[in-house]
Protein backbone atom coordinates (compact mmCIF):
# COMPACT_ATOMS: atom_id res chain seq x y z
CA UNK A 1 0.00 0.00 0.00
CA UNK A 2 1.25 3.50 -0.82
CA UNK A 3 2.23 5.49 2.25
CA UNK A 4 0.09 8.58 2.73
CA UNK A 5 2.29 11.68 2.60
CA UNK A 6 2.60 14.01 5.59
CA UNK A 7 0.47 17.05 4.84
CA UNK A 8 2.60 19.70 6.53
CA UNK A 9 6.07 19.05 5.12
CA UNK A 10 7.77 21.29 2.60
CA UNK A 11 7.14 19.89 -0.89
CA UNK A 12 9.63 19.86 -3.77
CA UNK A 13 7.08 21.02 -6.36
CA UNK A 14 3.54 22.39 -6.44
CA UNK A 15 1.01 20.99 -8.90
CA UNK A 16 -1.96 23.15 -9.89
CA UNK A 17 -5.27 22.08 -11.30
CA UNK A 18 -6.54 24.84 -13.62
CA UNK A 19 -10.35 24.82 -13.76
CA UNK A 20 -11.85 26.38 -10.61
CA UNK A 21 -8.38 26.86 -9.15
CA UNK A 22 -6.80 29.31 -11.59
CA UNK A 23 -9.73 29.91 -13.96
CA UNK A 24 -13.40 29.83 -13.03
CA UNK A 25 -15.28 27.00 -14.74
CA UNK A 26 -19.04 26.96 -14.07
CA UNK A 27 -20.91 26.23 -17.33
CA UNK A 28 -24.26 25.96 -15.59
CA UNK A 29 -24.09 29.58 -14.48
CA UNK A 30 -23.61 30.86 -18.02
CA UNK A 31 -26.30 28.59 -19.42
CA UNK A 32 -28.67 30.08 -16.85
CA UNK A 33 -27.96 33.43 -18.49
CA UNK A 34 -28.11 32.14 -22.04
CA UNK A 35 -31.24 29.97 -21.94
CA UNK A 36 -32.72 30.49 -18.46
CA UNK A 37 -32.48 28.27 -15.36
CA UNK A 38 -35.48 26.06 -16.13
CA UNK A 39 -34.34 25.27 -19.66
CA UNK A 40 -30.79 24.75 -18.44
CA UNK A 41 -31.90 22.26 -15.79
CA UNK A 42 -33.96 20.36 -18.36
CA UNK A 43 -31.01 20.18 -20.75
CA UNK A 44 -28.46 19.09 -18.13
CA UNK A 45 -30.90 16.47 -16.82
CA UNK A 46 -31.39 15.11 -20.33
CA UNK A 47 -27.89 15.34 -21.79
CA UNK A 48 -24.69 14.23 -20.07
CA UNK A 49 -22.82 17.41 -20.96
CA UNK A 50 -20.04 16.87 -18.47
CA UNK A 51 -19.55 13.36 -19.84
CA UNK A 52 -19.38 14.95 -23.30
CA UNK A 53 -16.71 17.31 -21.99
CA UNK A 54 -14.77 14.38 -20.50
CA UNK A 55 -14.41 12.98 -24.01
CA UNK A 56 -12.91 16.27 -25.15
CA UNK A 57 -10.59 16.21 -22.14
CA UNK A 58 -9.41 12.73 -23.13
CA UNK A 59 -8.25 14.14 -26.46
CA UNK A 60 -11.18 13.61 -28.81
CA UNK A 61 -11.99 16.33 -31.34
CA UNK A 62 -13.54 19.36 -29.67
CA UNK A 63 -15.93 20.57 -32.36
CA UNK A 64 -16.90 17.11 -33.52
CA UNK A 65 -17.83 15.84 -30.05
CA UNK A 66 -19.90 18.92 -29.24
CA UNK A 67 -21.65 19.11 -32.58
CA UNK A 68 -22.32 15.34 -32.68
CA UNK A 69 -23.92 15.60 -29.25
CA UNK A 70 -25.95 18.62 -30.37
CA UNK A 71 -27.22 16.71 -33.40
CA UNK A 72 -28.25 13.80 -31.19
CA UNK A 73 -30.49 16.14 -29.16
CA UNK A 74 -32.14 18.42 -31.72
CA UNK A 75 -34.40 19.96 -29.06
CA UNK A 76 -31.22 21.44 -27.49
CA UNK A 77 -29.05 21.68 -30.60
CA UNK A 78 -28.35 25.40 -30.57
CA UNK A 79 -27.72 25.51 -26.84
CA UNK A 80 -25.33 22.55 -26.85
CA UNK A 81 -23.34 24.09 -29.68
CA UNK A 82 -22.62 27.06 -27.42
CA UNK A 83 -20.32 24.73 -25.45
CA UNK A 84 -18.06 24.94 -28.49
CA UNK A 85 -18.94 28.29 -30.00
CA UNK A 86 -18.73 30.27 -26.75
CA UNK A 87 -16.31 28.09 -24.82
CA UNK A 88 -14.03 30.99 -23.91
CA UNK A 89 -16.96 32.71 -22.21
CA UNK A 90 -17.35 29.65 -19.96
CA UNK A 91 -13.64 29.55 -19.01
CA UNK A 92 -13.57 32.94 -17.33
CA UNK A 93 -12.45 34.86 -15.35
CA UNK A 94 -9.02 34.12 -13.94
CA UNK A 95 -8.94 33.69 -10.16
CA UNK A 96 -6.50 36.49 -9.47
CA UNK A 97 -5.22 35.51 -6.04
CA UNK A 98 -4.52 31.97 -7.22
CA UNK A 99 -2.55 33.36 -10.16
CA UNK A 100 -0.56 35.46 -7.70
CA UNK A 101 0.28 32.35 -5.66
CA UNK A 102 1.58 30.70 -8.84
CA UNK A 103 3.82 33.67 -9.56
CA UNK A 104 4.93 33.98 -5.94
CA UNK A 105 6.04 30.35 -5.94
CA UNK A 106 7.97 30.87 -9.15
CA UNK A 107 9.63 33.99 -7.80
CA UNK A 108 10.91 31.94 -4.86
CA UNK A 109 12.26 29.20 -7.12
CA UNK A 110 9.62 26.58 -6.31
CA UNK A 111 8.89 24.37 -9.35
CA UNK A 112 5.25 24.66 -10.43
CA UNK A 113 3.44 22.17 -12.63
CA UNK A 114 -0.06 22.06 -14.10
CA UNK A 115 -2.15 18.88 -14.02
CA UNK A 116 -5.54 19.54 -15.57
CA UNK A 117 -8.39 17.87 -17.41
CA UNK A 118 -8.37 19.94 -20.59
CA UNK A 119 -8.89 19.20 -24.26
CA UNK A 120 -6.13 19.80 -26.77
CA UNK A 121 -8.04 22.52 -28.61
CA UNK A 122 -9.59 24.05 -25.52
CA UNK A 123 -6.24 24.35 -23.80
CA UNK A 124 -4.82 26.10 -26.86
CA UNK A 125 -7.69 28.58 -26.66
CA UNK A 126 -7.09 29.17 -22.97
CA UNK A 127 -3.35 29.54 -23.51
CA UNK A 128 -3.98 32.39 -25.94
CA UNK A 129 -6.25 34.12 -23.44
CA UNK A 130 -4.39 33.62 -20.14
CA UNK A 131 -0.68 34.35 -20.22
CA UNK A 132 0.00 32.69 -16.86
CA UNK A 133 -0.73 29.27 -18.40
CA UNK A 134 2.62 29.54 -20.17
CA UNK A 135 4.48 30.06 -16.89
CA UNK A 136 4.50 26.48 -15.57
CA UNK A 137 7.74 24.55 -15.44
CA UNK A 138 5.85 21.50 -16.71
CA UNK A 139 2.31 21.09 -18.03
CA UNK A 140 0.35 17.86 -17.87
CA UNK A 141 -2.80 18.31 -19.95
CA UNK A 142 -5.16 15.35 -20.17
CA UNK A 143 -6.03 15.86 -23.83
CA UNK A 144 -2.40 15.31 -24.74
CA UNK A 145 -2.01 12.42 -22.31
CA UNK A 146 -5.13 10.48 -23.31
CA UNK A 147 -6.31 9.98 -19.73
CA UNK A 148 -8.19 12.17 -17.25
CA UNK A 149 -8.21 12.61 -13.49
CA UNK A 150 -8.98 10.83 -11.25
CA UNK A 151 -7.59 7.81 -13.14
CA UNK A 152 -4.47 6.78 -11.17
CA UNK A 153 -2.56 6.42 -14.43
CA UNK A 154 -2.38 10.18 -14.98
CA UNK A 155 -0.71 10.73 -11.60
CA UNK A 156 1.76 7.95 -12.33
CA UNK A 157 2.60 9.60 -15.67
CA UNK A 158 3.37 12.86 -13.86
CA UNK A 159 5.65 11.10 -11.37
CA UNK A 160 7.60 9.33 -14.09
CA UNK A 161 8.02 12.46 -16.20
CA UNK A 162 8.98 14.97 -13.50
CA UNK A 163 11.12 12.64 -11.38
CA UNK A 164 9.81 14.07 -8.11
CA UNK A 165 8.91 11.50 -5.46
CA UNK A 166 5.16 11.37 -4.72
CA UNK A 167 5.59 12.73 -1.19
CA UNK A 168 7.43 15.72 -2.67
CA UNK A 169 4.44 16.81 -4.76
CA UNK A 170 1.79 19.18 -3.37
CA UNK A 171 -1.37 19.03 -5.49
CA UNK A 172 -4.23 21.53 -5.36
CA UNK A 173 -7.58 20.70 -6.96
CA UNK A 174 -11.20 21.69 -6.38
CA UNK A 175 -12.59 18.15 -6.78
CA UNK A 176 -12.43 15.74 -3.88
CA UNK A 177 -12.18 12.66 -6.12
CA UNK A 178 -9.07 14.06 -7.82
CA UNK A 179 -7.54 14.91 -4.46
CA UNK A 180 -8.23 11.45 -3.05
CA UNK A 181 -6.64 9.76 -6.08
CA UNK A 182 -3.48 11.84 -5.66
CA UNK A 183 -3.34 11.23 -1.91
CA UNK A 184 -3.67 7.49 -2.51
CA UNK A 185 -0.40 7.66 -4.46
CA UNK A 186 1.33 9.46 -1.60
CA UNK A 187 1.06 13.05 -2.85
CA UNK A 188 0.48 15.93 -0.50
CA UNK A 189 -2.85 17.57 -1.30
CA UNK A 190 -4.95 20.64 -0.70
CA UNK A 191 -8.68 20.61 -1.47
CA UNK A 192 -9.30 24.03 -3.01
CA UNK A 193 -12.40 25.79 -1.73
CA UNK A 194 -11.13 29.32 -2.32
CA UNK A 195 -7.92 31.20 -3.06
CA UNK A 196 -7.51 32.60 0.45
CA UNK A 197 -7.32 29.16 2.02
CA UNK A 198 -4.83 28.08 -0.63
CA UNK A 199 -2.63 31.12 -0.03
CA UNK A 200 -2.79 30.45 3.73
CA UNK A 201 -1.72 26.83 3.18
CA UNK A 202 1.30 27.82 1.09
CA UNK A 203 2.24 30.43 3.66
CA UNK A 204 2.01 27.91 6.51
CA UNK A 205 4.39 25.62 4.61
CA UNK A 206 6.87 28.46 4.22
CA UNK A 207 6.68 28.34 0.42
CA UNK A 208 5.51 31.95 0.09
CA UNK A 209 4.92 34.95 2.27
CA UNK A 210 1.75 37.02 2.28
CA UNK A 211 3.92 40.00 1.28
CA UNK A 212 4.57 38.17 -2.02
CA UNK A 213 0.90 38.51 -2.93
Image (tube, grey):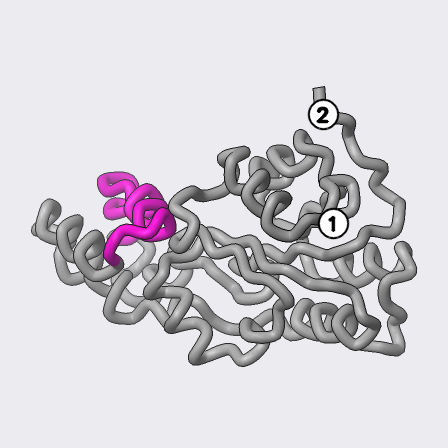
Could you tell me residue 194's position as x and y percent?
A: 68, 58
Could you tell me residue 66's position as x and y percent?
A: 21, 55
The local secondary structure at tag 1 comes to strand
Q: Residue at x 21, y 52 (%)?
A: 65
Q: Residue at x 49, y 35 (%)?
A: 151
| Mark 2 or mark 1, whichever is nearer to me | 2
Left or right position of 14 against 148: right
Left or right position of 111 against 86: right
Image position of 117 with respect to 102: above or below: above
Query: Residue 32 colored magenta?
Result: no
Q: Mark 2 to mark 1: distance in Å?
A: 16 Å
Q: Is residue 145 visible?
A: yes
Image position of 112 with respect to 145: above or below: below
Image quadrant in which you'd find residue 157: top right
- The C terminus appears in which quarter of the rendering? bottom right
* Magenta span main SS: helix
Highlighted magenta segment, given as a residue range = 40-61
Image quadrant in which you'd find residue 48: top left
Which mark is on residue 2?
2
Amino acid sequence: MTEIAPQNTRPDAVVFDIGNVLIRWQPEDLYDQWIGPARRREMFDTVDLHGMNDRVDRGEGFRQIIYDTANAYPQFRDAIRLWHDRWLDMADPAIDLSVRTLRALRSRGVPVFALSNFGRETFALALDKFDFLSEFDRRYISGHMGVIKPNPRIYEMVEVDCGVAPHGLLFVDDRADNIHAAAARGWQTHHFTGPDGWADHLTALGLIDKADL
